[in-house]
Image (cartoon, rainbow, N blue to C red):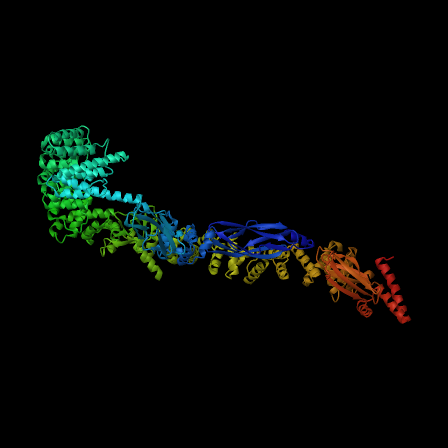
């Protein structure tokens, strides 16, 4: 700008101004919240002329890093500061360009967003709209839910939704988390799937999605003939709400007739099943054989069961023989584990005969045994022969006997034994010795029934026979026939039951399943049980079964003893302890275990003697004492005296538990019984509200492992594991939300369970709040009251104190604290001290604006100013802004501050600027010419000091070419306290140029100043050319000139002609001063073109020239082009002007000049004597008229003019 002024002051005009081009013409971009955005603005010269200028921003959040520039192409870096702004705000304003190519305003609008996510979230106006997106585009909704900026959505300002989002956002199954979030928020109902198929017999089940949403079903099969290729089903498997779930039916696993199974579909939220019933008419091949083998197993199992009963019952049980005959008469028989085997140890043999497949030969041989037992010897012999024949045939055909070991000794020994018995005599003894040898020495326990068939009197051998059986057991034989013999032996000799070892327990178990033992043996078992010191898992079930048959106090004592030694405290054990108490058995620890095993303290009252027992000798553990006290508290009306005896220890116990915050259904019973107003103190009041607000949460699904309690007001969620499907959770707020969590930490809405109050005692909550007003429950209740009060109006001092104290609590969530801070802001006039000390970054933009108002109203000007400085606040009220700027200017003693200057200008434009602001702006403000001009007018009206504003404004007008009010500003500048010759000369140059080149009429003072310069100059050539041109043109257009002016004109004109400058207005000067004939004799075509361009003229002079010819059009000065030519009377000069090289048919300008004699005569009369060419034209005209007198006069005048011109202009 200074260079421009200096050139103007020297009278130098730029031939051409740069053409300003700004790209883009408007800035509108998004800017991420919390970030700095930098963008570029191109300021270029369209015509390639060097462009200089400055750029200003009118917004405190937008600045140009290098505001001054100069080049043909300029890239300006614009920085947008959104670090303290919030999503949804807008930065709106203008960039103001002041250049030597003119002024330009570039509007800008920056939208503060959270990025792409923020743009999307801005379109979600409500939770319902987000739920609709989730319904139509689940994947898009899930991506939105995953955005870090999701909590900034408009609908997420709700504290409950924020708390739910925090609870769900870290779940491993993100789709499930989104679904449950919407369900918990009440935006949708849970997804629902049901089966349309009633029976899946065809291998497919049609599933219908009745309600949309995310789910993950797990399919499980119940039935060995069902195979599921796909275990998990999700929404992606459905098409238009339908899914055909296919599975396989395993034909090999189907049996004849009705095959029943089921496929169960389950998730955390729903469960249903579809029956699968398949009918198989006939089986063929391998399947039929497999089914037959299964039936044979069942039949043989029945045979073995009967056989064992026969062995226990003896030969008198003749009715069993027929049943065994029927079982063996079936077509096949296959072995199966018997129920007696359950008493055997793992890995033992099942029975004495244990074949894997009983063939016809063995079946026939067993029938022979039955025939012998009936005394049918002939039939027995025939069956033996038949069996041997079948065996030989099997050997010949290569069919093995899978039920025999070695070379078929079982079949051989049984057949030999039956033959010996038929023959009788010594052969029976010999055969028995052989079988006994194989049984005792080789351990073939399966021969025991054969040996007893040969030698039934062995049972009477006493110790020798017992030793044989004991040896078989110790070798590891666990045949039920062995246990049958031992059971029979114990019946005959119960004194052998000296202890309850493993063998005795196995024999007892066998006996109990076969209607044994008898009373005597049972007494022996009871006596042995009394001496047991180490009980196993088998003792209790066997002794309890024995007690059901032979109840006795001694056996009951043993049973209770086994339970106590096993530390049993379940419901079954409790029933036995109660029996023992009722039978008055004496057993150490019985009373204690009776109490500790009690499951439900409300089911029945403990016996009176138990309560008496523990009055003075109470060494129970805490859990047992809890059960004892809860039972007594529940039935205290029945035991009034004992209740009074227990009251002191119950109160001490209950209060101790209360102080630890423990709660369950039993403790709740105690609390209800003992808590009274007179025992409450501050310690109890601190924990009691949590107890009183405890809920028992019960889950409906087995998948659930924990319950999660979410508080909108609190920062942390509470997570409690479920025990037996329920949990006790203290609840501190009515706004609490219950969620459930599975083993994988996926969370679900509360619809999967129920909540019920546990310990509600009317009146105590209010009492606790009075005793402990700073406790969590009391604080939350007070805050809820304050929030309700704020919704209806201003807060009371007590409520304000409550809210302020709550903000220091770490347990409160940041969202709730933000909500409370908003309440304080709305009541800012009552808590100015808090607003002064608070961290302003914790508030949003609207709240900071309100804080700004409060601080101004309270007179805290500098604090309000610091608030604006730190957070770049935008929405500032104009009246308050004006007051603030005025105070800050006075406080800081008029420092130059960019932000203060910008805000002061904003206050000025808003019409709220006082004299202080005007004074400040006059000293420091620079902007667009129109703005500075308005400021100057306002300052003049307010009569404030303008400093150098006039000079700055005048210089800017001259620099930019915005000269609309140039004269008015110059006059104020001229009339000011200080003026500079440099600015005056620059102004005069501008006005002279505007007058000469643009035909803009200046004030008289301009020409007066130019005349002064001419008079002071030693030579006219020392005065700038534009001054001389403007002054001569002014003289040419004047009505009259003074002698001094005529002298100046005569001084200037020769110099212009010497410089080769010819203009048409020179002829007008002939009225006042002598003008050379070559000026007056010629006609001029004067054309105003473009500076820097060249033009050519196409012309002809008629009538002599009939064709146009082309000549260059001379440039006289800047954009003025002049062509001169001599025309005689009656000639016509036609011309067309075009740019050089322009092929356009339409010229820039065209016209014609005709020599008009009468007009020239008139000019001659007004301007004086004409030129020599005028005289020549006149002589030609008089000659043509033959007017000799007129001709002589013209010739005399021409000769005189020639002599005078020669003398004045030294013409030769």
Residue located at (15% from left, 33% from top): 419
Residue 1037: % across, % down: 74, 65
For the residue pair 750 and 310, the one nearer the viewer reads as 310
Q: Is residue 736 visible?
A: no
For the residue pair 489 and 333, the one nearer the viewer reads as 333
Residue 267: % across, % down: 33, 50
| Left or right: 701 in relation to 815 | left
For the residue pair 743 and 819, the one nearer the viewer reads as 743
Residue located at (15% from left, 43% from top): 322
Q: Quadrant of the C terminus?
A: bottom right
Residue 910 drawn above or below residue 555: below
Residue located at (26% from left, 53% from top): 693
| Left or right: 226 in relation to 365 | right
Q: Quadrant of residue 1036?
A: bottom right
For the residue pair 314 and 174, the one nearer the viewer reads as 314
Residue 651: % across, % down: 18, 49
| Left or right: 853 in relation to 935 | left
| Left or right: 1078 in relation to 375 | right
Q: Is residue 197 visible?
A: yes
Residue 671 drawn above or below residue 964: above
Residue 330: % across, % down: 21, 43
């Amino acid at each position: 700008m200074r260079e421009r002024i200096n050139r103007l002051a020297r009278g130098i005009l730029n031939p051409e101004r740069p053409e300003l081009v700004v790209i883009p013409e408007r800035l509108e971009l998004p800017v991420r919240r919390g970030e700095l955005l930098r963008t570029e603005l191109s300021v270029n010269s369209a015509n390639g002329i060097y462009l200089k200028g400055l750029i200003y921003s009118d917004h405190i959040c937008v600045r140009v890093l290098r505001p001054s520039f100069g080049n043909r192409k300029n890239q300006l870096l614009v920085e947008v500061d959104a670090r303290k702004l919030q999503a949804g705000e807008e930065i709106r304003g203008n960039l103001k360009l002041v250049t030597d190519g003119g002024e330009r305003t570039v509007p800008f609008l920056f939208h503060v967003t959270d990025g792409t996510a923020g743009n999307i979230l801005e379109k979600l106006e409500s939770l319902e709209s987000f739920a609709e997106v989730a319904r139509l585009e689940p994947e898009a909704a899930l991506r939105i839910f995953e955005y870090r900026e999701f909590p900034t959505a408009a609908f997420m300002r709700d504290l409950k939704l924020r708390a739910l989002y925090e609870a769900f956002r870290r779940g491993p199954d993100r789709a499930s988390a989104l679904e449950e979030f919407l369900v918990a928020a009440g935006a949708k109902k849970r997804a629902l799937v049901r089966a349309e198929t009633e029976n899946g017999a065809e291998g497919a089940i049609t599933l219908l999605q009745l309600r949309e949403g995310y789910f993950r079903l797990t399919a499980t099969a119940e039935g060995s003939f069902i195979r599921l290729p796909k275990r998990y089903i999700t929404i992606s498997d459905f098409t238009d709400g339908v899914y055909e779930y296919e599975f396989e039916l395993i034909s090999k696993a189907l049996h004849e007739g009705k095959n029943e199974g089921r496929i169960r579909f389950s998730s955390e939220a729903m469960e249903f099943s579809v029956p699968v019933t398949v009918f198989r008419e006939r089986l063929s091949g391998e399947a039929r054989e497999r089914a037959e083998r299964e039936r044979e197993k069942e039949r043989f199992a029945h045979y073995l069961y009967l056989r064992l009963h026969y062995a226990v019952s003896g030969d008198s049980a003749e009715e069993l023989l027929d049943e065994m005959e029927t079982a063996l008469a079936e077509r096949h028989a296959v072995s199966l584990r018997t129920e007696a085997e359950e008493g055997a140890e793992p890995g033992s043999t099942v029975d004495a005969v244990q074949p894997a497949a009983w063939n016809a030969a063995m079946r026939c041989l067993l029938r022979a045994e039955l025939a012998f037992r009936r005394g049918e010897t002939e039939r027995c012999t025939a069956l033996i022969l038949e069996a041997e024949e079948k065996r030989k045939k099997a050997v010949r055909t290569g069919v093995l006997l899978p039920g025999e070991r070695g070379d078929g000794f079982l079949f051989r020994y049984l057949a030999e034994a039956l033959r010996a018995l038929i023959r009788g005599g010594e052969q029976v003894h010999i055969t028995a010795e052989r079988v006994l040898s194989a049984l005792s020495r080789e351990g073939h326990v399966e021969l025991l029934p054969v040996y007893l068939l040969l030698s039934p009197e062995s049972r009477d051998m006493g110790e020798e026979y017992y030793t044989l059986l004991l040896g078989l057991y110790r070798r590891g034989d666990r045949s039920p026939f062995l246990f049958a013999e031992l059971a029979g032996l114990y019946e005959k000799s119960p004194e052998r039951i000296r202890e309850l070892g493993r063998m005795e327990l196995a024999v007892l178990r066998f006996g109990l399943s076969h209607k044994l033992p008898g009373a005597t043996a049972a007494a022996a078992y009871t006596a042995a049980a009394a001496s047991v010191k180490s009980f196993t898992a088998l003792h209790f079930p066997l002794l309890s079964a024995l007690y059901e048959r032979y109840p006795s106090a001694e056996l009951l004592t043993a049973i209770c003893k086994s339970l106590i030694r096993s530390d049993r405290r379940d419901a079954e054990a409790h029933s036995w302890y109660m029996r023992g108490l009722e039978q008055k058995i004496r057993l150490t620890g019985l009373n204690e275990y009776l109490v500790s095993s009690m499951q439900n303290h409300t089911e029945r009252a403990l016996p009176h003697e138990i309560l008496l027992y523990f009055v003075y000798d109470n060494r129970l553990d805490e859990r047992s004492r809890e059960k004892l006290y809860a039972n007594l508290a529940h039935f205290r009306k029945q035991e009034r005296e004992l209740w009074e005896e227990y009251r002191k220890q119950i109160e001490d116990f209950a209060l101790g538990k209360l102080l630890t915050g423990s709660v369950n259904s039993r403790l709740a019973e105690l609390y209800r019984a003992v808590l009274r107003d007179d025992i409450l103190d501050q310690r109890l009041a601190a924990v009691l509200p949590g107890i009183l607000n405890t809920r028992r949460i019960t889950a409906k699904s087995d998948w659930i492992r924990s319950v999660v309690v979410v508080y909108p007001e609190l920062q942390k969620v509470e997570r409690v594991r479920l025990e037996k499907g329920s949990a006790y959770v203290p609840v501190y707020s009515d706004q609490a939300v219950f969620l459930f969590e599975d083993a994988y930490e996926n969370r679900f809405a509360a619809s999967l369970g129920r909540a019920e109050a546990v310990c509600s005692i009317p009146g105590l909550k209010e009492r606790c709040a009075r005793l402990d007003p700073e406790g969590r429950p009391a604080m939350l209740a007070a805050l809820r009251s304050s929030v309700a009060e704020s919704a209806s109006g201003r807060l009371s001092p007590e409520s304000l104190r409550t809210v302020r104290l709550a903000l220091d609590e770490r347990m409160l969530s940041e969202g709730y604290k933000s909500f409370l801070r908003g309440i304080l802001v709305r009541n800012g006039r009552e808590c100015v001290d808090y607003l002064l000390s608070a961290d302003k970054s914790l508030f949003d933009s609207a709240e900071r604006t309100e804080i700004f108002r409060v601080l101004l109203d309270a007179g805290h000007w500098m604090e309000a100013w610091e608030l604006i400085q730190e957070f770049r606040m935008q929405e500032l009220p104009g009246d308050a802004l004006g007051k603030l700027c005025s105070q800050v200017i006075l406080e800081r003693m008029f420092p130059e501050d960019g932000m203060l200057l910008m805000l002061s200008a904003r206050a000025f434009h808003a019409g709220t600027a006082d004299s202080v602001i005007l004074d400040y702006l006059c000293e420091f403000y620079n902007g667009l010419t129109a703005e500075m001009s308005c400021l100057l007018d306002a300052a003049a009206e307010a009569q404030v000091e303008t400093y150098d504003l006039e000079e700055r404004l005048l210089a800017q007008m001259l620099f930019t070419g915005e000269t609309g009010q140039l004269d008015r500003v110059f006059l104020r500048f001229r009339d000011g306290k200080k003026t500079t010759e440099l600015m005056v000369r620059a102004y005069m140059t501008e006005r002279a140029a505007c007058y000469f080149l643009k035909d803009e009429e200046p004030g008289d003072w301009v020409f007066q100043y130019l005349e002064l310069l001419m008079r002071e100059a030693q030579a006219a050539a020392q005065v700038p050319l534009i001054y001389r041109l403007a002054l001569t043109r002014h003289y040419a257009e004047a009505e009259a000139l003074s002698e001094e002016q005529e002298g100046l004109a005569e001084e200037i004109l020769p110099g212009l002609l010497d410089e080769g400058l010819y203009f048409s207005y020179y002829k007008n000067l002939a009225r006042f001063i002598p003008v050379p004939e070559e000026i007056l004799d010629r006609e001029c075509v004067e054309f105003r073109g473009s500076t820097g361009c060249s033009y050519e003229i196409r012309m002809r002079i008629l009538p002599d020239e009939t064709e146009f010819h082309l000549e260059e059009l001379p440039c006289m000065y800047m954009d003025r082009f002049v062509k001169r030519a001599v025309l005689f009377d009656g000639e016509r000069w036609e011309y067309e002007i075009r740019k050089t090289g322009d092929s356009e048919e339409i010229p820039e300008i065209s016209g014609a000049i005709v020599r008009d004699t009468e007009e020239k005569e008139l000019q001659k009369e007004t301007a004086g004597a004409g030129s020599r060419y005028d005289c020549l034209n006149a002589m030609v005209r008089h000659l043509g008229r033959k007017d000799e007198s007129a001709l002589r006069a013209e010739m005399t005048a021409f000769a005189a003019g020639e002599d005078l011109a020669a003398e004045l202009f030294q013409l030769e």
